[in-house]
Amino acid sequence: MYEEKHKHLKELEKVLVTRVENVSHELNYEHSTDYAEQITERENEDVLRNLKEETQLELKQVRSAIKRLDSGEYGSCIQCGEAISPARLDALPYATRCIRCAS
């Protein structure tokens, strides 16, 4: 289980790092000189900034899950100490709480 979960989390980490890099690149492009296009570009930048923030948060959670996996704490609820169901970990591999405590 360890090897499979570790591999999955590392792959997810790579995807998220690439996404952050791509969004960062998009945020650094030159703006148009046309005022109407600048308005659209600013709106797009807001969406990109939100996407970058959400991705950075998810990346932090994935890296934390990797640390918990390496320390043997992965899969245990940080609130009650009970095991987090395998189905929950499959759906949300960086879950830190069981369904009961997350509700």
Image (cartoon, rainbow, N blue to C red):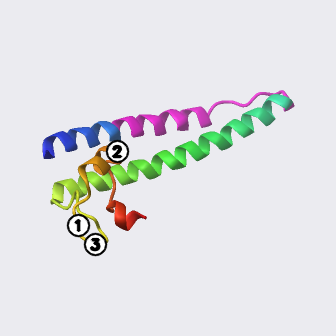
The residues tagged by marks 3 and 2 sit, at their Cα atoms, a distance apart of 20 Å
Q: Secondary structure at mark 3?
A: loop
Q: Which residues are magenta?
A: 14-35
Provide the residue designation for mark 2.
91
The residues tagged by marks 2 and 1 sit, at their Cα atoms, a distance apart of 18 Å
The quadrant in which the N terminus is found is top left
Amino acid beneath label 1: Glu
Residue 38 locus on image (x, y percent): 79, 33
Provide the residue designation for mark 3.
80
Amino acid beneath label 3: Cys
Q: Are marks 2 and 1 in contact (CB under 8 Å)?
A: no
Q: Residues within 10 Å of mark 3 (few under 14, many from 20)?
A: few
Q: Are marks 3 and 1 in contact (CB under 8 Å)?
A: yes
- Could you tell which of marks 2 and 1 lies nearer the N-terminus? 1
Which residue lies at the image location 40% right of the left edge and 63% below the top edge?
102
The quadrant in which the C terminus is found is bottom left
Q: Is residue 24 left or right of residue 81?
A: right
Residue 91 locus on image (x, y percent): 34, 45
Q: Are marks 3 and 2 in contact (CB under 8 Å)?
A: no
Provide the residue designation for mark 1.
82
